[in-house]
């Protein structure tokens, strides 16, 4: 359960950062010599892998348990594992589309500077 919560929290924080990058920080961080599409691809690929390990561990741990007193808690843990499976699929699809964007828009082939003048 601790691994599951660590993966969910770190992926959430990384996704929030990348959303803020696309919404607010894009103009300021393009000046850095870093391919942000490649960074986003590797983050989502790692998130897909770690979500796979997290939901597998979560479902393996809590799916077969029956207890009259604490059954609602075990059911909540199984539901969390199922929602993590949905997140895993979403991150996997996102990884595919970011990979396509990364490979089709290569900044090394650009003739003009992507940074707008200040």
Image (cartoon, helix red, strand yellow):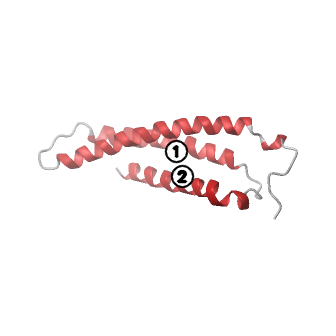
Tell me which corner region of the image, top left, top right, bottom left or bottom right, holds residue 62: top left
Farthest residue to the bottom: give it: 118
Give the side of residue 70 with respect to residue 53, left or right: left
**Residue tagged by mark 2?**
15
Give the position of the C terminus as an image quadrant: bottom right
Residue 31 sits above or below residue 71 on the image: below
Q: Distance between the residues labelled 1 and 2?
A: 10 Å
Foreground of the two, 21 or 50 = 21
The residue under the point 72% across, 48% down is 35
The residue under the point 77% across, 58% down is 31
* Labels 1 and 2 touching (C-beta < 8 A): yes
Where residue 88 sits in the image (x, y, percent)? 46, 39
Residue 27 sits above or below residue 50 on the image: below
Labelled disc at residue 47: 1
Task: Name the element at disc 2.
Answer: helix
Where residue 4 sits in the image (x, y, percent)? 39, 48
Where residue 42 sits in the image (x, y, percent)? 61, 44
């Amino acid at each position: 359960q601790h691994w599951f919560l660590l993966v969910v929290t770190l992926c959430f924080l990384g996704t929030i950062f990348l959303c803020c990058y696309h919404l607010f920080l894009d103009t300021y961080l393009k000046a850095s010599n870093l391919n942000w599409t490649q960074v986003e691809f590797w983050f989502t690929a790692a998130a897909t892998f770690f979500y796979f390990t997290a939901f597998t561990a979560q479902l393996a741990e809590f799916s077969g348990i029956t207890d009259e007193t604490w059954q609602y808690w075990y059911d909540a843990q199984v539901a969390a594992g199922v929602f993590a499976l949905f997140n895993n699929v979403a991150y996997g699809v996102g990884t595919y589309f970011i990979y396509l964007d990364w490979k089709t828009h290569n900044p090394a082939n650009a003739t003009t500077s992507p940074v707008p003048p200040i």
